[in-house]
Image (cartoon, rainbow, N blue to C red):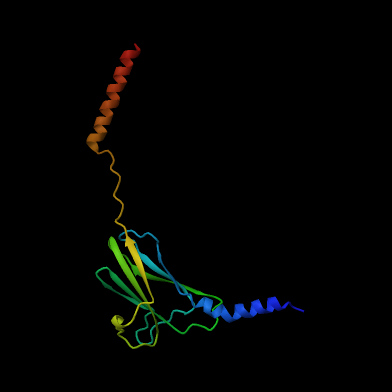
Amino acid sequence: MRSPTLLKSSLIFFLFFPFLCSALPNLSIEPENPIAGEPISLHYVGCEPPFPHVDSGDLFYTEQTDNLIQFVGFFTFSPPICSNPITHTYDLGAFEAGDYSLEVYLLLANLNLPINLDTRPPNETLPIVIAAPPKPVPTFNKSGLLLLILFLLTHTLLYKRKSK
């Protein structure tokens, strides 16, 4: 016979499991520290499977106004119990250096297009800081190399004279 504590804990777990999955989706930017010109992706982990829009056939689209990037992804209804979260990566493209704000809208795939994003709150807003590409480390140019050779020759000649 099973213990009542185990049964109660199992019942509580299975009753609250769908609510635990409602904390999904989990959104993140890849790479974490992007550099200007480097492709950026939005990584999605959630219960709602990505689905192409009924009219356009696109899984997502983006709009950019200055430093505001709006991502609209299309999904179907999530299953009642989410035991296997779905992961998907969306290519957002490459951007110039600067501070950006990414508004993520997760919408049903049967909404009428175009979608007015001004009337809807975003599901999540992610800050993105894109760094400038690293500057190359300066090295010797021809005149620096010539000075180095002259220094070595002078030092070698003086060393030979002192050793005699």
- Residue 131 at x, y percent in the picture: 31, 57
* Label total for image: 0
Tell which of 47 and 92 is nearer to you: 47
Q: In screen coordinates, is 46 left or right of 129?
A: right
- Residue 14 at x, y percent in the picture: 60, 80
Q: In screen coordinates, is 160 left or right of 46?
A: left
- Quarter of the image holding residue 101? bottom left
Position of residue 35 relative to residue 24, above or below, is above
Q: In screen coordinates, is 86 left or right of 100?
A: right
Position of residue 138 relative to residue 94, above or below, is above
Tell which of 70 and 151 is nearer to you: 70
**Residue found 30% across the figure and 45% down from its top:** 137
Looking at the image, which residue sits at the far right?
Answer: 1
- Residue 154 at x, y percent in the picture: 27, 22
Position of residue 95 relative to residue 52, above or below, is above
**Residue found 29% across the figure and 63% down from its top:** 99
- Quarter of the image holding residue 8? bottom right
Tell which of 73 and 93 is nearer to you: 73
Q: In screen coordinates, is 53 left or right of 22?
A: left
The C terminus sits in image quarter: top left
- Residue 103 at x, y percent in the picture: 34, 73
- Quarter of the image holding residue 18? bottom right
Looking at the image, which residue sits at the far left?
Answer: 143
Looking at the image, which residue sits at the far top?
Answer: 164
The N terminus sits in image quarter: bottom right
